[in-house]
Structures are given as C-alpha cells and as structure tokens.
Image: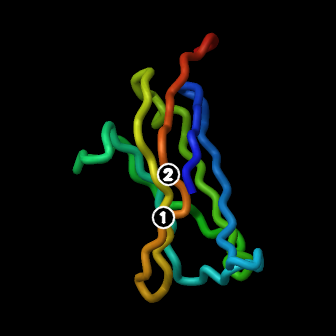
C-alpha cells in the first residue's frame, strides 16, 4: 500500500500496524520482524533511519514503533520510507511505502 507520512521535526514518532489476511482476520506474527526504513532516495543503499517495530500482540498481528524525538532531527524535506514484514519463514512483504516528509516545528 502506498501512503504518504508527514511528521514534524523533533516530535516523537509513533506508528502502529496490524498485519491481516485478505479477509481482515489478524495474522499471528510470532517470530516475525517488522522494520521501518527511511532513505534519501529509492535507489540509495544508505539508510537515514532503520528501526524495528516492537511486537505488541503477536496473535492479533499488532506491532508498534516509537522513535524518540532526538532521532527525528532530520532535514526539512521529503524522504522515502517503507515498512517491511519478514515472517517466520523469511517471506518479505512491504506493507506500506512512499514519501516521508519532515515538516518544520514552531516550538523546539
């Protein structure tokens, strides 16, 4: 799925995901890894940020990521991101991707 994310610089970034089957039922993600990655461009090999989600409710397919404000001190511009799910059998699925835009903050 393609989805733009806009985030204010120096704010804590929190995102939750729920992995579902096509019929909307949750997938048990026990033993899975879900990552959040940001790059300057799609073709870059260097990550600006690469973090792993915490599995919060494996049986119901739920995970959350929290990135501290000091790690979100990124330049004001658009980047590219994706969220990838690697299941227990090493099947890799991109569940979200596209632009990640850092917006200016008023209070810092």
Q: Residue at horizontal 32%, vertical 46%?
A: 42
Work out whether residue 40 or residue 15 is closer to the camera in this orientation and state it: 40
Q: Residues within 10 Å of mark 1 (few under 14, many from 20)?
A: some
Work out whether residue 68 or residue 101 is closer to the camera in this orientation and state it: 101
Q: Please determine whether, in this image, residue 3 is positioned above or below residue 26.
A: above
Mark 1 lies on a secondary structure that is strand
Res 97 label: 2
In this rendering, position of residue 90 left or right of residue 30: left
**Label 1 to label 2, Cα distance in Å?**
7 Å
The answer to the question of whether label 1 and label 2 lie on touching residues, with beta carbons closer than 8 A, is: yes
Work out whether residue 79 or residue 75 is closer to the camera in this orientation and state it: 79
Work out whether residue 37 or residue 95 is closer to the camera in this orientation and state it: 95
Q: In the rendered view of the protein, which quadrant contains the C terminus?
A: top right
Mark 1 highlights which residue? 94
Q: Quadrant of residue 1?
A: bottom right
Q: Please determine whether, in this image, residue 24 is positioned above or below residue 77.
A: below
Q: Position of residue 18 (x, y in %)?
A: 69, 66
Res 64 label: none
């Amino acid at each position: 799925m393609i989805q733009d994310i806009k985030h204010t610089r120096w704010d804590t970034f929190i995102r939750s995901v729920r992995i579902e089957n096509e019929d909307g039922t949750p997938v048990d993600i026990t033993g899975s890894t879900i990552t959040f990655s940001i790059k300057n461009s799609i073709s870059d090999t260097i990550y600006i940020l690469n973090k792993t989600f915490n599995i919060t409710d494996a049986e119901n397919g739920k995970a959350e990521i929290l990135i501290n404000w000091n790690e979100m001190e990124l330049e004001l511009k658009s980047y590219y991101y994706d969220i990838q799910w690697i299941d227990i059998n090493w099947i890799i699925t991109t569940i979200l991707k596209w632009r990640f835009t850092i917006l200016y903050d008023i209070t810092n």
